[in-house]
Image: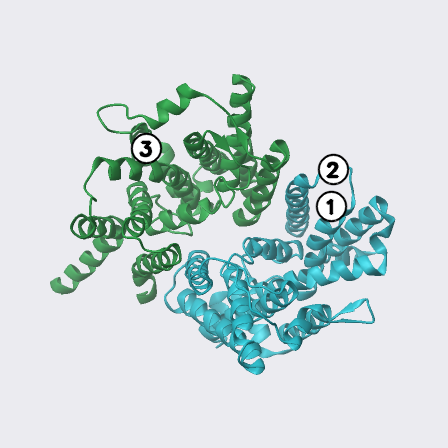
Chain colours: A green, B cyan
Amino acid sequence: MTKKKGITLDLAFFKKNIALILFLALLIFNIFATNNFLSWITFNNFFKQVSRVCLVSLGMSLVIATGGIDISVGSAMALGSVLAALGIVHESPLLILFSVILVIAFGCLAGTAVSKFAILPMVATLALRYVMRGMAKGISGAANVTYTAPKLTAFFTQPVIGRVPVHFFILVIAVVVVYILVNKMKLGARIEAYGNNPVAARNCGINTVKIVIFCYAVTGALSWAAGMLEAVVVSSAHPSTIGTDMEIDAIAATLIGGTPIDGGYPNIIGTTCGAFLLQLISMMCNMNNVSYPVTLMLKACIVLAALYFHGIGKRSR
Amino acid sequence: MNKTKSFFSNNIALVGLLIVLFVGVCVQRTFVSPENLCNLLRSASLMGFIGIGMTFVVLCGSIDLSVASVFALAGYLMLNLSQYNLILALLVPLLAGAAVGFVNGVLVEKLSIPAFIATLATQMFIRGLVQMFCNQETYKVDSVPVPILALGRLTFGKILPLPLILFVIATLIAAFVLKRRFIGRSMYIVGGNLEAANMMGVSVPKTMITAHVLCSVLTCIGGMIYTSRVGVASPLAGTGYEMYAIAAVVLGGAKLTGGVGKVSGTFIGTLIMSSFSNIFSMQNILSAVWSDVVVGSVLLIVIMVQAVVTIYSKGKKEA
């Protein structure tokens, strides 16, 4: 009896931390197997690339925790960065501010459609995905928006303290803020309650509409930030390439991290590890001269493996 | 009066199509010319195969995002094998599609991985596979056999393209299966009420896997026709088509939670989606870069209207 209990406990631990375990395993594998892996350049590159996916995934975790899904994040990134890039070109801070507000407003619209009109999250965000990508294309005339802002570029390309890039700090701050929000504040408990049982949450007097709108709005804001990070690297914003397939990576990271797709506890640490894991796979393949097609296939297999472990408990029930 | 009312609330898509056609005629008189309609229907039939397949999957309450890469895989296999054997060139892509569908079904149903992410993973895997086959560049062959080319290019009497005929046949068969066959009816039950389906003795895994297999096979037909029309196989063919197909299914009145939807609805949804691009290329009031905004806005309006109608009729029942 006790032995049986031990096995289930181990499985639960394993399931909860599958993203962390896989990430650490791959990290150790790389330290020994990949040449020049342990270096500041690798560290810098890793955080510069992972910060975008990770920011979006944090928002996505909140949305998925409410039982929703947001497939418009990539388009939100494009719209936000194109508008902001235009703002930098015309030197108008007002336009940059407007870009943030617009993207958040679209997030609120998605949240309203989902919670007030009972539209399926996937359908609502599918429509907004077309609208936002289309607006980005329309505003820029489907052309690249290039700007010159040496100070801004320098801030994001040169390390801040020692050799650590600014992306690292942005990421840490975002993760800590969202983690505290979810685990230490009432709001987090309410999101979890809503995700577990929307009807019960409503009956308990939680303003469920507000909660859902908040989650989608936060995702919008984080997508804007991720779009800016992507645009600032090349000092330009292309409406059709920025943020393509970002929703795929973000959803994959969230689900690997252990946030249940039908709602429940948003596992922020898990999501972060999930995003790190996906980035590490790409990086490992890059550094070992593995071709892009094989990278894709490998990624798919690891995603499936991680999700298979999450499914174990479900099946035995 | 009541009958017409319920007819319209059941067929919002049809009203939408009429509005779109009306707008088309207003924008450009030649919109209804036989040549243009032929063009429109031909492009609609490409996307339509994916849409019909997606209808099966959506009815079961599942979703299939892998169609985007299966589309490319079918094209590559057909073009490659057409150099050796004609029958193999037509059969192997369909078998490959069936295999992918089977894997999707097993992942979703047997391993209980959420459909969205499971089919996303197969999409990535197959995209990688196709890119590996093609060496990441467009795949060409020296001479494509005539029957293969005819698949996408043959037109009867100048206005009746072969893809359209195939599409209509596929639609009719799909509608028949869903209405009159056991497997079709069980798809509605599995999507509508999983527990009831189990209690009634409907095999959920079998139904789910069949739906996924049908979806992938139909997608393969679409991919083969596309490739035959273009004449080359691009490793990036079909990118974004999964969302396009889902939009067509949703416009047709299907619910992504499963159990609600019709093939005829998807047929109309597909026509709406392809009319958009057609109308957009014919007018010069609004620049073509805005087309995505219009597609998204119309989608948003249609689902809002559907939602309001549902809430309204629900409130009436309760009162």
Circles 3 and 2 in contact, beta carbons < 8 Å? no
Is A215 or A160 nearer to us in this picture?
Answer: A160
Image location (x, y in percent) of residue A15: 26, 55
**Distance from Cα at disc 1 to Cα at disc 3:** 42 Å
Circles 1 and 2 in contact, beta carbons < 8 Å? yes
Q: In this view, does A71 lie to the left or right of A182?
A: right
Q: Are marks 1 and 3 on the same chain?
A: no
Q: In this view, does A192 lie to the left or right of B82?
A: left
Is A204 or B90 nearer to us in this picture?
Answer: B90
Tag 3: amino acid: Leu
Q: Which residue is drawn at 41% across and 58% down?
A: B121
Tag 1: amino acid: Phe
Between disc 1 and disc 3, the foreground one is 1
- Badge 1 or badge 2: first in the primary sequence: 1
> Outermost residue, left direction?
A2
Q: Which residue is drawn at 66% across and 77% down?
A: B147
Circle 1 — which element?
helix
- Tag 2 residue: B286
**In this picture, is B302 found above or below B146?**
above
- Tag 3 residue: A171
**In this picture, is A124 found above or below A296?**
above
Q: Quadrant of residue B109?
A: bottom left
